[in-house]
Image: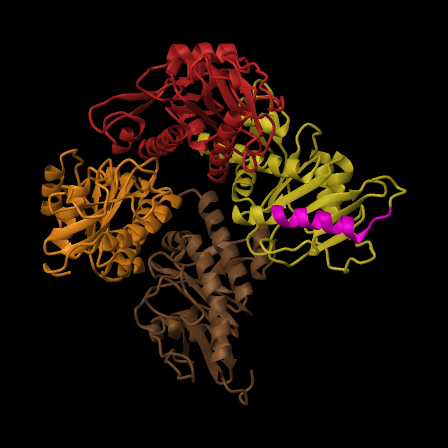
Chain colours: A red, B yellow, C brown, D orange
Amino acid sequence: MGTQDRLTAGRVFEAGGRLAVESARFTAFGWMRGTSGNLSEVVSRDPLRLAVTASGLDKGELTASDVAVVDEAGDVVPVEGVAPLTPSAEAGLHARVAALTGAGAVVHVHALNAVVAGHRWPDGVLLRDVETLKGIGRLAHDDEVIVPVIRNSQDMTELGDRFESAYDPRTPAVIVASHGLYAWGSDLTRARHVTECVEWLLAYALAVTPA
Amino acid sequence: MGTQDRLTAGRVFEAGGRLAVESARFTAFGWMRGTSGNLSEVVSRDPLRLAVTASGLDKGELTASDVAVVDEAGDVVPVEGVAPLTPSAEAGLHARVAALTGAGAVVHVHALNAVVAGHRWPDGVLLRDVETLKGIGRLAHDDEVIVPVIRNSQDMTELGDRFESAYDPRTPAVIVASHGLYAWGSDLTRARHVTECVEWLLAYALAVTPA
Amino acid sequence: MGTQDRLTAGRVFEAGGRLAVESARFTAFGWMRGTSGNLSEVVSRDPLRLAVTASGLDKGELTASDVAVVDEAGDVVPVEGVAPLTPSAEAGLHARVAALTGAGAVVHVHALNAVVAGHRWPDGVLLRDVETLKGIGRLAHDDEVIVPVIRNSQDMTELGDRFESAYDPRTPAVIVASHGLYAWGSDLTRARHVTECVEWLLAYALAVTPA
Amino acid sequence: MGTQDRLTAGRVFEAGGRLAVESARFTAFGWMRGTSGNLSEVVSRDPLRLAVTASGLDKGELTASDVAVVDEAGDVVPVEGVAPLTPSAEAGLHARVAALTGAGAVVHVHALNAVVAGHRWPDGVLLRDVETLKGIGRLAHDDEVIVPVIRNSQDMTELGDRFESAYDPRTPAVIVASHGLYAWGSDLTRARHVTECVEWLLAYALAVTPA
């Protein structure tokens, strides 16, 4: 979407509908317990605008309008016809991920295996020589993949800085220790596929590595 | 609901419908095997009245009228138009939890991880420095959370006394050892979210703590 | 059903419908992989007749007529209007269980935890002091429950003899080692509840007992 | 299907519909994360032609036409009315399996337990004396079953050669190490049943064998 395009409520709610569908799916996986986790889709690249799931709602029961629009700092941007819902507190990190990686969609879930893996390997999770790595754009052989693990924070700027320091453009995911997983892709479907594959890979790493 | 409001069957069955929905959800999670577990909603605060799931029924197949109304002692209170079903034997503890905590809804489930955690940590389960603690109203950092573990009993007064002794107003859940989990919140949705988050936290604690 | 009642196809298909529903449920639990497991309902007590799921079919896709009628030896009994499908090879054990225990329904599933528990405790699984025991008709406190484990056999008479030797009228379940679980109850719903509770109890025993 | 029969789009899409149904089922099991895995059905034996799921698609959302037709080398064969979609890169191995084993359908999934078992037992997984072996056509007693484990490769000819070397006609499955499971049967339903049983058997082997 170029700068000349005006962001419409219709465009935002289309994104909101997709975010609701994928949130319901992740909820069914047990990865969005309570009201945890949040998903976003880039609805404008220049200036950067994201549709992000609203704060405090059950992620298994979202509707297309349970969405807020934020800018590159995670602050709410008014859009005509879109109610000014409170975005997730983590919207700022979503925006940072989208800005830095060029991703079209970002997924943040509290997948148990991700938090367990982050606890076990606080300096990053090494994955290599496993076919499912192809599902996150890496090689099935002789490719050392590190899923970075960054320390948790309630300050999105601090968390964003840690993300930037740890970011490897080849790896579309990061674990926030004691917290959850961020994963991203060119669009929401791709971000979901990456999320699913990373979670599988972390489960596999935990299963085959003696404690 | 103030004392001047008369409790109607309609009000009770509205609560019963919500209890049926959430019971079906927890059954699908495997947390209400057989006919185990029970859910309640406060339908009057003064005097205290709870709608509680009826005893001996499959919790995956409840209807709005599969509910009993009990008082602060867990004894059945007649309501015109509501069949006098037998409440869960644990209704007395539900009422005690609602009275002491001010909760609007109480969930009791036989979640396996809760019973395993209670077996492993009979003096209480320590949780700290994990984001999902925010889902139960605590802090993600530097907040020592103890989920109390109390000994099981078939005597609801005895169990209620143990609950009162162990109760910390900051923690909306308690494990009954060799039995299951109680969790509560301002309404049934909140009580469900707390239940989901506590179960996740206990699973996490079990996964990252060497035996 | 007394001896004077004639067994009708309608009566058999009513049972078959219930068996299909519960088979689909257990399939969803992952307890009837491939075409494994079988369920039965007593459709006549004197003489003993059971409706049992037909052999070789996908247990997630049964219909009401995917059922055979067998006698106390597990042999097919012709019923007008009921196609002579092949009963499960294990129908003889179902009949033996129904005859000995007086159960109205018998469930046999390949639940993983049951087979793992049978491997771990070949002389029987000891359960005590856990609330879910009430779900199988035992006490939550001070009641030593042994789920018997019998050796597997392809000879239903031999297996039935082992069952009879191991049978304790107080315990409505038995593990066939290297094979699966049998559980029963007064009707099919009760047999399902017992099955669900026994599986939970075995999972719990495995989780809390150091290897 | 004899050589005289011409392969029609209708025949291909019938197979595609069945492949879509089973792919959705395996996706729900968590065995086809991202876009991983692929299923095929033989639509002509002489010459050998397989309908195989198209590459890069979400396996939980396939339609009957999300299918490609390949020959014995895994190369696309044009069929009037069938869009020339890209088959899975692994189509060549599917064809090789179908040619060598005579199977009517082949399943390839990234089932976690299969990859974990392959990591644990790189020389093959020994299974014996367990009833579920009957679900893959073997004996429940005194029958030593080895599920072969072959090394992974991106070269389908190399992978096919490894498969041929490891193949035992009595065992309808093979683990590709660090990758996933292949299983097959006379038709797609049978291939699914075999897949389900093998996965159960591998889970069982992992659960009962001390690390």
Residue C97 screen position, x and y as percent: 45, 72
Instruction: Decide if residue B205 is in sight here.
Output: no
Against D163, residue A117 (above or below) is above
Give the side of residue A45 with respect to residue D122, left or right: right
Q: Residue at x 34, y 73 (%)?
A: C156
Nearest to the observer: residue B10 or residue D148: B10
Residue B162 % position (x, y): 71, 40
Query: Which image quadrant is residue D88 in?
Result: top left
- Position above or below: B55 against C161: above
Q: Looking at the image, can residue D76 be seen?
A: yes
Residue extending furthest bottom? Answer: C4
Is the N terminus of chain A in the top left, top right, bottom left or bottom right quadrant? top left
Residue C69 point in image, percent of width and height: 42, 78
Q: Magenta residues, as a range?
A: B6-22
- Left or right position of C140 against D120: right
Report the residue at 25% width, 21% height from top.
A144
Quadrant holding the C terminus of chain A? top left
* Residue in the foreground of this view, choosing between C140 and D77: D77
**Quadrant of the rendered image containing residue D185:** bottom left
Q: Quadrant of residue B123?
A: top right
The answer to whether residue C130 is magenta is: no
Q: Position of residue C84 (x, y in %)?
A: 36, 79
In the rendered image, the vertical position of residue C157 relative to residue B95, given as above or below? below
Query: Residue B8 magenta-drawn?
Result: yes
